[in-house]
Amino acid sequence: MTRVVIVDDHTLVRHGIRSLLEIADVDVVGEADDGQAALAVVTDTAPDVVLLDLRMPRYDGLWTLRTLREQGIEVPVLVLTTFDDDTLVLDALRSGARGYLLKDVTVEQLTRAVLTLADGGTLVAPSITSRMLRGIRSVPNVAGPDTPPAQPLTERELEVLRLMAEGWTNREISRGLSVVEGTVKNHVSAILLKLSARDRTNAVLRALHLGILG
């Protein structure tokens, strides 16, 4: 069973999400009302996924993402918020979020997103992804000053990258392309290497900035 921690400053929201996820057979192992409390809960429970609100008093979602990364806590984080703002989306993804959904999603969409992240995938709300693709020139460069130039991708790697951008897991990509999962993992590794990306989300953002997915 997938283990989840919910981080939101509204008690009713946390309880509501907990009830919905537990109906969907997802185990909520902890709750927190701000980033500082979240760090302690995540350390104590070692969840598979963290559901994180962005706008919270004291220690907000962006602080939480950056601190998790600084402390080397590599838990997949799914941002779940009411704020449909491109700048916030990009800030969250650049800070380490593996997914970004709005709170108007259905239970099925939320459950699928949690399972996708737990399985190593990424997922951004389709409406946000399409806006990012249309406004590709505004996507900031996620590469550092010492990042090597991107290397050309093969046609198959581009195909895998597009599916990664849609939030597909390795397993889903292997089924969609009718290849074994090990082959997909090799393609993903090659994509990360060629784009000098630390993870799948970073690779997609870098590809968007470079126009590779345009």
Image (cartoon, rainbow, N blue to C red):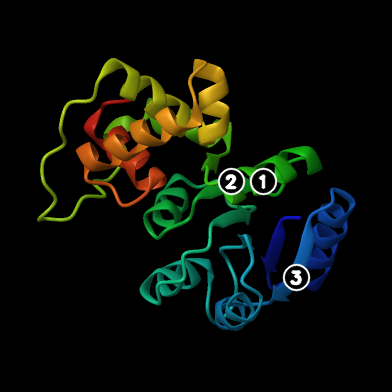
Residues at marks 1 and 2 touching, judged by CB atoms closer than 8 Å: yes
Q: In terms of sequence position, does the residue under pointer 1 or pointer 3 come before the other?
A: 3
Q: CA distance from mark 3 to mark 2?
A: 18 Å
Query: Of helix, strand and loop, which one carries label 2?
Result: loop
Q: Which residue is under mark 1?
A: 115
Q: On the rendered structure, is 49 left or right of 94?
A: right
Disc 1 + disc 3, Cβ < 8 Å? no
| Rendered view: 156 above or below 192 | above
Q: Nearer the viewer, mark 3 or mark 2?
A: 2
Q: For residue 171, what is the image quadrant?
A: top right
SS of the residue at dot 1?
A: helix
Marks 1 and 3, how far apart at CA: 15 Å
Q: Residues within 10 Å of mark 3 (few under 14, many from 20)?
A: some
For label 1, the crowd category at 10 Å Cα-Cα, with few meaning under 14, some 14 to 19 and many 20 or more, is some
User: Three-letter amino acid code at disc 1?
Assistant: Leu
Identity of the residue drawn at 73% across and 73% down: 30
**Any mark on residue 119, and which?**
2
Compared to 125, does 1 lie above or below?
Answer: below
- Residue drawn at the location 26% of the way across and 50% of the way down: 142
Quadrant containing the C terminus in the rendered view = top left
- Name the amino acid type tagged 2: Asp
Of residues 101 and 190, the one drawn nearer to the viewer in this rendering? 190
Other-residue count near label 2 (Cα within 10 Å), few / some / many at <14 / 14–19 / ≥20: some
| Quadrant in the picture for residue 108 | top right
In terms of secondary structure, where does tag 3 sit? strand
Q: Position of residue 28 (x, y in %)?
A: 77, 65
The amino acid at mark 3 is Val
Residue 157 vs residue 101, the one in the foreground: 157
